[in-house]
């Protein structure tokens, strides 16, 4: 993970569950910020994001700025804002149904991002 803009000193880590490539089509489980990143050109900072899920379906997400050692984390339990098994199955079916449309959207974003970084 890295920054998008030059001199960006914070990043927002958002955790989603779902099968679609666009976050808007998935379920937000939680989010947190990693702040205090040293100003640098966009894409230079190296932020390691780690996901750890245990047998009780508790998800721990942590982020570490590899340059400064700054850390932050979030714990997501399976009782809050989680999708039911039936809802997950429906989302998988929906992902298959919209696969071609999602690929087209992904290609457009790839071209847009390439042009912006040119």
Image (spheres, rainbow, N blue to C red):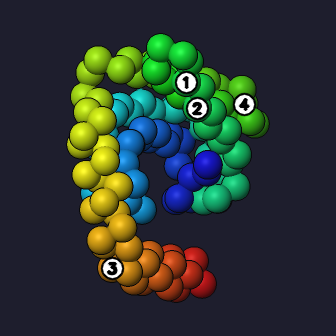
Using the image as rendered, state which of residue 38 and residue 16 is in the foreground: 16
* Residue at horizontal 71 percent and vertical 26 percent from the top: 69
Callout 1: 10 Å neighbours few (<14), some, many (20+)? Answer: few
From the image, tell me which residue sits under label 4: 68
* Residue at horizontal 40 percent and vertical 22 percent from the top: 76
Using the image as rendered, state which of residue 89 and residue 10 is in the foreground: 89
From the image, tell me which residue sits under label 2: 51
- The percent position of residue 108, horizontal first and vertical second, equals 42, 83
From the image, tell me which residue sits under label 3: 101
C-alpha span from label 2 to label 4: 20 Å
Quadrant containing the C terminus in the rendered view: bottom right
| Residue 25 placement, left or right of 37 | left
Residue 53 is labelled as: 1
* Pointer 4 or 1: first along the chain: 1
Residue 95's place in the image compared with 46, above or below, is: below
Q: Quadrant of residue 112?
A: bottom left
| Residue 108 placement, left or right of 28 | right
* Pointer 3 or 1: first along the chain: 1
Say if residue 34 shows up in the picture. Answer: yes
Residue lying furthest right: 67
- The percent position of residue 5, horizontal first and vertical second, equals 52, 59
C-alpha span from label 4 to label 1: 26 Å
Callout 4: 10 Å neighbours few (<14), some, many (20+)? Answer: few
Q: Quadrant of residue 55?
A: top right
């Amino acid at each position: 993970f890295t920054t998008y803009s030059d001199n960006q000193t914070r990043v927002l880590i958002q955790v989603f569950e779902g099968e679609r490539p666009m976050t808007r089509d998935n379920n937000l489980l939680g989010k947190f910020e990693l702040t205090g990143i040293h100003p640098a050109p966009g894409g230079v900072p190296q932020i390691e994001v780690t996901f750890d899920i245990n047998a009780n379906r508790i998800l721990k997400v942590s982020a570490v700025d590899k340059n400064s050692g700054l850390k932050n984390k979030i714990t997501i339990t399976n009782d809050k804002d989680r999708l039911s098994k039936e809802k997950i199955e429906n989302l998988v079916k929906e992902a298959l149904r919209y696969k071609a449309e999602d690929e087209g959207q992904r290609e457009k974003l790839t071209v847009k991002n390439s042009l912006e970084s040119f």
